[in-house]
Image (cartoon, helix red, strand yellow):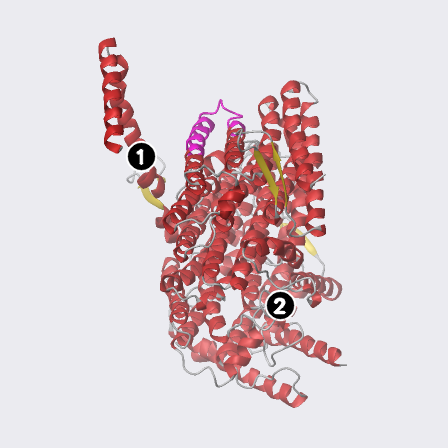
Amino acid sequence: MAVILDLLVQGAQMALVLLLAPLLTGLVRKTKARLLRRQGAPIVQPYRDLLRLLRKEVVLAENASWLFRVAPYLIFASTWVAAALVPTFATGLMFNWTADLIAIIALLGSARFFLALSGMDIGTSFGGIGSSREVMIASLAEPAMLLIVFTVALIAGSTQLSTVSAFMASPSVGLRMSLALALVALIMVALAENARIPVDNPSSHLEVTMVHEAMVLEYSGRHLAMIEFGGFLKLLLYVSLIASVFMPWGIADHAAGPVEYAFGAIAYLIKLALVGVLLAVFETAIAKMRVFRVSEFLGAALMLGLLGTLLLFVSRSL
Amino acid sequence: MTPVAVLLWAIAALLGTAVMAVALSRAAVATQLVYSACAVICGVALLFLLVHLVGQPGSTTSLSLPLGLPWLGAHFRLDPLATFFLIVVDLGGAAASVYGLGYGRHETAPHRVLPFFAAFLAGMNLVVLADDAFTFLLCWEFMSLTSWALVMTHHQDKENTRAGYIYLVMASFGTLALLLAFGLLAGPDGHYGFAAIRATEHTPAVAGLVLALALLGAGSKAGLVPLHVWLPLAHPAAPSHVSALMSGVMTKVAIYGFVRIVFDLLGQPAWWWSLVVLFLGGISTVLGVIYALMQHDLKRLLAYHTVENIGIIYIGLGLALAFQTNAMNGAAALALAAALFHVLNHSIFKSLLFFGAGAVLTATHERDMEHLGGLIHRMPYTSFAFLVGCVAISALPPLNGFVSEWLTFQAILQSTNLPQWSLKIMVPAVGGLLALSAALAAACFVKAFGVTFLGRPRTPAAAQAQEVDRFSLGAMFICAALCLLAGILPGLVIDGLAPVTLSLIGDRMPVQTSIPWLSIVPITAGRSSYNGLLVFAFIAFSASLAAYVIHRFASRALRRAPAWDCGYPDLSPVTQYTASSFAQPIRRVFGDLAFRVREKLDMPPPGDIRPARFIATLRDRIWDTLYMPVVRAVNFGADHLNRLQFLTIRRYLNLVFLTLITLLLVLAIWR
């Protein structure tokens, strides 16, 4: 019985991230539009886009290989698995121990690996430019992310996200310098990883500036839907990550009752909305930077992460 | 018959095959015969070793033969460490031999490859079995020379001759360093047996000196920065299956030499050793991958990438040393297991990738990625296997490369309790370097796979490539399957490594195979766990679920059309991103670390119709700052000593007399 219940909760989490991901993106877009005094598309527009794309036929370039057709599903699947492993409304789910934080980051790395490859598959210059810039950004963002993971893991004594989240909710954490550094670095990395302003512009179709959009230029129909969905999930993943590590309030713990789960879900929704609105405000207030300034931006994140880790090596209480 | 005797018979069989290859060298059947013989011998030895590992874990047997120095004899010993490394050697040997069955058919000079191939395999096996300094050095040199002969297979090519020359110089230098190391270890009485060395107490000064010499000797063979310069020249020069052996296996034999000396023979380490090893490992990982990123020769890219992986292994070894000195044996066992796991992983996927590069070479006669492209259409099986290798080496889950890097990260997270301040600073810095190199490795292999196999063919040779034969494909798919197996069932490998860590450190990681769901748990379940099998199953399940749901309920319509490319598709394949242009952003960010980059833009003035040119030259900083001065000094000395060749007989007699007097004087003063 307990196993079935655990499975149900785990399944609920997988379904929840899938259902909420487009909503979060819709919320960010709507807020941005309102901040710019535009009416904006309704919040549910991303769902409509996805459904429309799914129903359309795929127009495939003549020399596309099997990799180009398989990659969208792989990207979607690995992002979904990663997103489902981050605690949202409850910790200690049945399969939480499958992958720790390092493995979750690496799963996103797998998704990016295939995305960058599919950008090069057709053999157009736009695909190449996108892939090439994407791996350059990733080569700085990923180590920065791992150093943030180190910082968090050293404080919590675990790389297991459930344990980290439970520890962060306990009063023994206190105010720490290293956590502040890690939070700033994590926000910077999250902006870069999700192709948000100031690193990349998610709504840009100007050739010279785009990174992510250039890679997926040749995709259409259901393939594009899968990749877009992967992108929504990734944004949700990073928001959940920030929420579960730095705002762990209200998360239900292992073997909680339905009331706690419901409470956790409501808390999670509030956190999502809060971070989403903050992201929109931030994006509206700042300009996109040149591609080669990105390395300085992410280099700063890397240094912050390293500093956070170093502080913990110097003293466990910093 | 003891296990050592069985393995020595296998080695004798390999040597016999080498002799047979000399005799048969020009016969048509020689290629098939030699490679089948090598494959069978290595395969049998591999099976025997696996059975030995499972059946008698931790057992040690030895044997001495009346060969070599008369008062010493030749000692051989099979302990857990040697068992593990022999498995790596024979696995790589068997795979390379199977590959050779197909690849070797295209060899233009088989008589230059076959005898040395078998002898090279025998040499690597012998080094690992050797149990006294004399035998060890002799076999080490035998291994170096046979591999040198293989590098010189196509000696008509100027570049190969240069590669062979540099390799020979560096190999001799390495052996010299090891010779001195063993001289110090043996002491003035000349106890060359490893058992005697192990029993002796070494003073800290001697032990430190031996560590430095072992780093020079084994490190130069393994390709540790800054001793790596020969490696990217020599490894690609050999035929591809030999490149696979040199990069995948011979560098591991070098690691074996280092582990044997430092962890086994030297006794209790001093804490600063780990500092040196970690530092060298850290810079090797990052510089190795940056060098690799800048290459457009596929085999050279792979060879440079070996430097990165050797760095990762040395980081693991350095961590193990650091924990061992501070009596944190559990963590030391974890770090050592991570390093050894990476040894196994790297030998598998680097062999696979070199086999793939060899297949591309067979199919197109091209190694330069700028002349390739679009091979995924012409060579579907090769490209699939190569892709598996790329994912594995980029440390992406669920394949094996990720597991060993994950274990290394877990070891790094154990190190906050180290008391030494310099280690407290060094370990997180090395962790950052490791993370950086992992991300750059993924970039490197997106480039390698994307430019070679994806896109449109850049030359007619690439457009007309043919899939390779089934032996080559078989060898590649065996390696690919092993990458997946070691990735999803890492617990088996970790348990297999337990006897090694027990014998060297006296502790082991927790038993993994009894953990439910076949997860791996390095310390305790609350700290960290990873389950490759479930990750693999989840990805496979959700990808198929998504594909099924969409094809069933949404749409399965598909239309082929010209590429979109923002409305301006260009038909010429030269407009694609090339290897150099792909790496350009990374060169701008990281290039200065390893290279002196000079970019020259030649823009003709308006009215001039000559095309504009952009030339970027990269000069290796390490070669320029460390090696060129030595080369210049040697040349200067040679030029000036040249005069001594043209003296009269009177002067020569004077010189001899003077030398004699000087030596006698030195002796007199010394006494």
- Residue in the image at 26% along x and 33% along y: B670
Q: Amino acid at mark 1?
A: Val
In front of the other: label 2 or label 1?
Answer: 1
Q: Residue at x 47, y 58 (%)?
A: B319
The local secondary structure at tag 1 comes to helix
Quarter residue A290 falls in? bottom left
Q: Which mark is residue A80?
A: 2
Residue at the extreme right: A1
- In the picture of the structure, the residue carrying the numbered disc 1 is B630
The number of callouts visible is 2
Mark 2 chain: A
Q: Position of residue B497 (x, y in %)?
A: 61, 54
**Figure quadrant of the C terminus of chain B:** top left
Query: Magenta: predominant secondary structure element?
Result: helix
Q: Alpha-carbon distance for marks 2 and 1?
A: 55 Å
- Residue B155 shown left or right of residue B392 in the figure: left
- Point out the stretch of residues depicted in magenta: B149-172
Looking at the rendered structure, the kind of residue marked 2 is Trp
Report if residue B413 lies within the magenta region: no
